[in-house]
Image: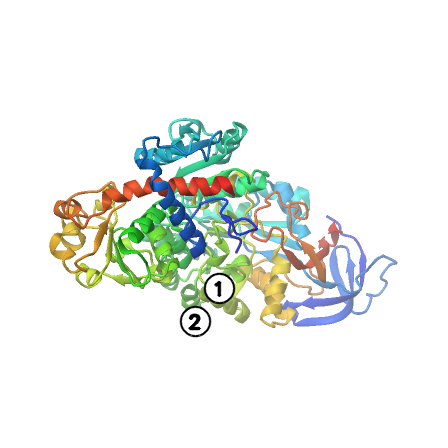
Amino acid sequence: MHNPQLNANGDLCHLLSIEGLPREVLLHILDTASSFLKVSTREVKKVPLLRGKSVFNVFFENSTRTRTTFEIAAKRLSADVINLDVTRSSTAKGETLLDTVDNLVAMHADMFVVRHAASGAPHLIAEHLHRIGRADVHVVNAGDGRHSHPTQGLLDMYTIRHYKKNFTDLRVAIVGDILHSRVARSDINALITLGAAEVRAIAPETLLPAEIKTLGVQVHHDMTSGLRDCDVVIMLRLQNERMNGTLLPSAREYFRCYGLTPEKLALAKPDAIVMHPGPMNRGVEIHTDVADGSQAVILPQVTFGIAVRMAVMGILAGN
Amino acid sequence: MTGQTLHIRNARLIDPANGLDRQLDLYIVDGHIATIGQAPQGFPHARTIDADGLIACPGLVDLSTRLGAIEPELGAAVAGGVTSVACPPDTRPPLDEPGLVERLVRRTDTLGLARVYPIGALTQRLDGQKLAEMNALTRAGCIAFSQAKQSIVDTRLLLRAMQYAATFGYPVRLRPQDQFLAGDGVAHDGEVAARLGLSGIPTAAETVAVTTALLLARETGVRLHLSRLSSAAGVALVQHARQSGLPVTCDVSIYHLHLSEADIGYFDSNSRFDPPLRSLSDREALRQAARLGVAAICSDHTPVDADGKQLPFGEALPGASALELLLPLTLQWAAECALPLVSALARITCDPAAILGIAGGSMRVGSAADLCLFDPVETWQVNADTLRSQGKNTPYLGRQVTGRVRMTLVGGRIVYQR
């Protein structure tokens, strides 16, 4: 199977998903992010790596937070950043996704940061660029449907490595709506590639894909067995529309069974870290005391996210 | 239409309906097969077609062809050796009015390419709420009734539809899929859907609908055909029902014999099918069902223009252009499972003809000379230029296939030649 994100030399030309990326590529991104972390703490928070380049944030689905982190990362690399809220403009007038892309290419875009509600949309764009002979334009997936959110996966790996130093001895639990979560798929792929000892998926059957085990995870239906002796607990956001009674009876029952409380967290290792991709639903998937507790590393995740996105854009621009 | 008088020389004749596979000459008089082997008495000096190295078989019969634009698609049919096609009722507008059916029949008759057999709508507008005028539609030319891709959610209406069709002996064809279980799914609810984050269609969407249809068919005595089964469990249910004496038939699409969910790769929208491509073990079961003759093979030809496919996987239109690949992919399947051609070709000639209750699909003396002459070893590349169909949408784009139609005859007339 042709891997559309690597060029003939095996270098990264797009970041579309974690799946299919070799360990060395992932580690190279994390190492590069380390060097960028310092930039954000300097008085002049800029490096000239992307000077003169145009980065287009093309968000077909709203997300102020993710778009902002990409914008900050691109600006710290000295790129010109153009934000397009496509949900309100061209597609509303009936323009197709690829027509929009062609127009932006004609405006001399160097990089697209794409968010789309449909799984696979960034792949479609990358293939189209290849077909029209514009493989020099890079695509960064900022979240597509239920499929992938690779920069989130990478920043989660950065966070884990920061606190736990290596991956091979780790037991990681991912809790919540794995069925609809692009973050879960990215984290699972990254953890497996980086050699985590055990990746657990904890959720009721209604929130798990039918063949989840083929991704390499152990499935647990209850927190007691699932959290035991874990080094890392990744909580997923539960979207409001999942609580309408067809997948789960209620938010209250979900919190009782799968919400992370201090008591449940005590089952994990004493030095376990708690992560969340944000935005959090306090009292739905996570208890306030845990969210604000000493084991939570949710805000450092955000800081590392900027460095990771700088690393991804920097590496792509160099390839 | 008066056909020609022709002498087809030295072809390897394969007629699955009669178990024939021999090198013999074929004589066509006035559009009908006059004799096989010896020239008929008083056979005039006629045009001779030298078919050295070619196989002559009955023109292929396709159980499900979506026409889109009629002329190019019927051109694609004869280019693929297909001389009879059944057209499902989900045309625009659907085939629920006798006038629409008559117009379709008239137009396709005038073209004189492949023969078109309309399948009428089982319910008005295919909405699953009110029965269509099956008697009037039959008079207009419909040979069976179906809901195309729509389900009848109301099982009482489904029972009534079957009872009514059974009253007149009209066959009913159903594409079994439970609408609620299928939901907004776009791919088999398996490994690939888990990997790519695609919403899944569980196998139960098929088995629940098959079970319901089989139970109601037994209840009503209707002649039931189940279209485009996609799962091992689905064909197992049909096989079991047949063994217990229910005269139910079924088909599988040619692509489902070759492809699986793995062919979606990284979101290849040409591999989006309805029903979805399922697992490798499902594919094996479908191949086995076709090998045993439990299932016939159909093209499920669905031409889709580029705009309908250049979309994210879940938004792309399902289906593939298939008429011109039906023969080569059937040959490939036969070779892979070491099935003699006389058996393999039955699945796309006499078996579907029997299911449709039409005359084609055999080379019986006296029957209309609907024939396909093909080179079994010629290899060709599938691409936008080699496909006559307006639909260039197929997962086989760019691939080489073996077996190429050289001539197609309908009623003794040469309607395609290369």
The answer to which of A101 and A41 lies nearer the viewer is A41
Mark number displayed over residue B197:
none
Give the labeled residue for mark 2: B245
Judge from the rendering whether residue A60 lies leftward or rightward of residue B289; answer left or right. Answer: left
Mark 2 residue element: loop
In the rendering, at what x and y percent does residue B154 appear?
32, 50
Residue A114: image quadrant is top left
Q: Marks 2/1: CA distance?
A: 26 Å
In the rendering, at what x and y percent does residue B105 appear?
60, 44
Amino acid carrying mark 2 in the image: Gly
Local crowd size for mark 2, using a 10 Å CA cut-off: few (<14), some (14–19), many (≥20): few
Between circles 2 and 1, the one closer to the viewer is 1
Q: Which residue occupies 15% across, 44% down? A: A292
Mark 1 residue element: helix
**Disc 2: host chain:** B
Mark number displayed over residue B283:
1
Q: Are marks 2 and 1 on the same chain?
A: yes
In the rendering, at what x and y percent does residue B226 appear?
46, 59
Local crowd size for mark 1, using a 10 Å CA cut-off: few (<14), some (14–19), many (≥20): many
A202 w.r.t. A119: above or below: below
In the rendering, at what x and y percent does residue B404 appear?
70, 57
The answer to whether any part of residue A192 appears in the image is yes
Residue at the far front: name it. Answer: A43
The answer to whether any part of residue B177 appears in the image is no
Chain-order first, disc 2 or disc 1 = 2
The answer to which of B50 and B124 lies nearer the viewer is B50
Q: Which residue occupies 30% across, 56% down? A: A165
Q: Which residue occupies 45% across, 64% down? A: B282
The answer to which of A134 and B85 lies nearer the viewer is A134
